């Protein structure tokens, strides 16, 4: 499995996620991990490929080439993954672990779950490796329809009603 990991551009390190990626890569040598690590520590492993930052188009290319994406709880990244028909593994950053300025990522992730978005949430007590196993075993949630497509479908229905 090819796994894309992104932490975006926030200036606080996301060491917890990088350590979990190192462990997952070590325990799953058949997988390839492509990591955009930003200001975090650089994860080490024979099957880990790292870039400090990526452009938006590079990230979208990774969504197309990878089977799975692991990311911080950033709305833009998350919706890009969903629009690419990928169920994202969301790992929110925590304030008490000095990963972010507050807990808005935790709150955002819980909100997404409460609204039924097809995400796999990995909270502080959970493991990324377990979430990757869920993806491997087909447990990943399905069914997200991008709002653009729904709008177009609704518009087509209206036009068909107006124009016989």
Image (tube, helix red, strand yellow):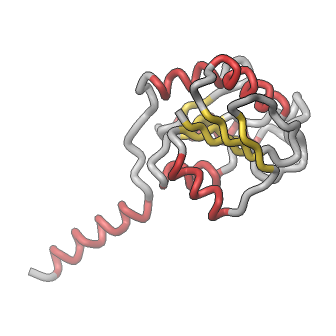
Image position, residue 97 (x, y; %): 88, 29
- The answer to whether residue 101 shows anywhere in this view is no
Image position, residue 54 (x, y; %): 73, 57
Residue lying furthest bottom: 163
Residue lying furthest front: 46
Q: In the figure, 25 relative to 160: above or below? A: above
Q: Quadrant of residue 126?
A: top right
Q: In the figure, 67 relative to 157: above or below? A: above
**Which residue appears at 85% of the width and 37% of the height?**
42
Q: Quadrant of residue 110?
A: top right
**Which residue appears at 42% of the width and 65% of the height?**
148
Total tally of numbered discs in the picture: 0
- The answer to whether residue 147 shows anywhere in this view is yes
Residue 15 horizontal side relative to residue 122, left or right: right
**Which residue appears at 56% of the width and 37% of the height?**
2
Q: Quadrant of the C terminus?
A: bottom left
Residue lying furthest left: 164
**Which residue appears at 79% of the width and 37% of the height?**
103
Q: Nearer the viewer, residue 38 or 102?
A: 38
Q: Nearer the viewer, residue 78 or 51?
A: 51
Residue 146 horizontal side relative to residue 51, left or right: left
Image position, residue 65 (x, y; %): 52, 49
Image position, residue 24 (x, y; %): 67, 23
Q: Quadrant of residue 155?
A: bottom left
């Amino acid at each position: 499995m090819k796994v894309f990991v992104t932490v975006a551009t926030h200036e606080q390190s996301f060491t917890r996620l990088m350590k979990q990626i190192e462990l997952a890569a070590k325990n799953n040598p058949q997988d390839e991990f492509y990591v955009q690590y930003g200001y975090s520590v650089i994860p080490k492993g024979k099957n880990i490929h790292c870039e400090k930052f990526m452009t938006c188009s590079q990230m979208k290319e990774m969504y197309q080439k990878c089977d799975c994406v692991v990311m911080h709880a950033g709305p833009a990244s998350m919706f890009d993954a969903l629009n690419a028909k990928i169920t994202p593994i969301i790992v929110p950053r925590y304030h008490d672990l000095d990963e972010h300025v507050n807990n808005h990522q935790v709150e955002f992730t819980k909100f997404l779950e409460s609204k039924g978005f097809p995400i796999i949430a990995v909270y502080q007590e959970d493991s990324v490796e377990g979430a990757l196993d869920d993806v491997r075993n087909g447990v990943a949630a399905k069914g997200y329809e991008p709002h653009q497509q729904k709008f177009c479908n609704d518009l087509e229905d209206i036009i068909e009603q107006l124009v016989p």
